[in-house]
Image: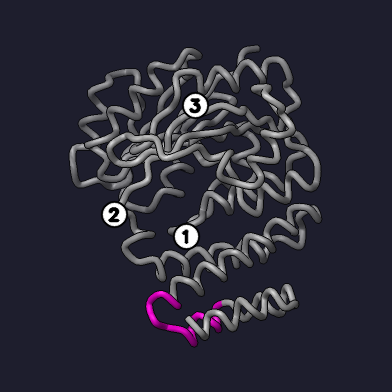
Amino acid sequence: MNPRFSVVIPAFNAAATLARAIGSVRAQSWPAHEIIVVDDGSTDATAEVARQSGEAVRLIRQKNCGVSVARNAGAAAATGEWLAFLDADDWYAPDRLKLHAEWITDDPGLDFLTGDYEYRDDAGSLLGTSMAQHASGRLLLAKAAGATRVLMETPSELAAFVADHFGDTHTLSVPRARFVELGGYPTGFKVCEDVHFLTRLVARSRRIGVVCQSLGAYVIHGGSATRRDPVAAQRENVRTLTDLARLADNFPASVRQGVAARMHGARYNLGCALSKSGQHVAAAKAVLPSLAARPGWQTLRDVLSMLKG
């Protein structure tokens, strides 16, 4: 049976970019089973843009509850066996669904699939590709040795992926049943909610399909919340990962290792953000928990470097 993909697009005040996102799904070489746009309490013309696609798009409207609630609402309404996600300011490459669908058909035992993608700026200029910019991606590119498909399955590969993943939400294809079983995306978090879900998914997976070519574009905005208030964004990042670490005792050892590494990096990034804002004592305190989790001279140097600014 050919896999049917329900593509969920959460949208908040996305009238300027939503048509492009929808168009990239409608242009897929492997047609989506359905496109579900979840309007998360927009105050602009987001709903009207979605309606312009007619019956090609199912529109769900809700009060503003955040991207996790919107994605979960779309998944709950989906009727396809597989879920794919796309943020309203990003877009799919033409073969994004086809590359995953054909592999699922060839190998139904895959737990989920992901792949490479492009970073683009607001003007659409290419800034780089994800797998090449992450250690976990470079590890798998070397393993693939030029092939389009590569399996992620060893403990070291899983640990590296959790620590610093290369596959973002719009490259993820996950069985709807597994998504529901895991409870979907966590609510109550503004940053890193995608990492929270992806890590829980990896913890339940053994064979992950990775496509070593671009499946779409992720737009990096100069005025994003992370850039406007980096301290607040990094605090929220640590808060989300703290909740994830609470669950990690039940994860395989490789995934626990990845969570610990990601938390270490998040605390360091928070420290850097605080240090750059002149809060050197707070920066040292932000990194200090890493000294207990990962004692050693390198971590101690990180703490001291925050005090020095």
Disc assigned to residue 88: none
**CA distance separating discs 2 and 1:** 20 Å
Q: Amino acid at mark 2?
A: Gly
Q: Contact, CB < 8 Å: mark 2 with mark 1?
A: no
Which residue is at a point 56% across and 65% down the rendered structure image?
Answer: 266
**Which residue type carries mark 1?**
Phe
Query: How many residues crowd around disc 3 within 10 Å: few (fewer than 14), some, or many (20 or more)?
Result: many
Task: Identify the residue at horizontal 37%, vertical 45% (top origin).
Answer: 220
Q: CA distance from mark 3 to mark 2?
A: 31 Å
Q: Is residue 130 left or right of residue 219?
A: right
Q: Secondary structure at mark 3?
A: strand
Q: Give the overall secondary structure of the magenta segment.
A: helix
SS state under label 2: loop
Q: Position of residue 74 (x, y in %)?
A: 44, 36
Highlighted range, magenta = 275-286
- Report if residue 302 lies within the magenta region: no
Q: Which mark is residue 189?
A: 1
* Numbered label attached to residue 223: 2
Q: Name which of mark 2 and mark 1 comes first in the sequence.
A: 1
Dot 1: element:
loop
Q: Disc 3 or 2, which lies upstream in sequence?
A: 3
Residue 244, image x and y in percent? Answer: 62, 61
Q: Which tag, 3 or 1, sits closer to the chain's start?
A: 3
| Label 1 Cα neighbours within 10 Å, binned few <14 / some 14-19 / many ≥20 | some
Q: Residue at x 78, y 53 (%)?
A: 254
- Kindly identify which residue carries mark 3: 6
Identified by mark 3, the residue type is: Ser
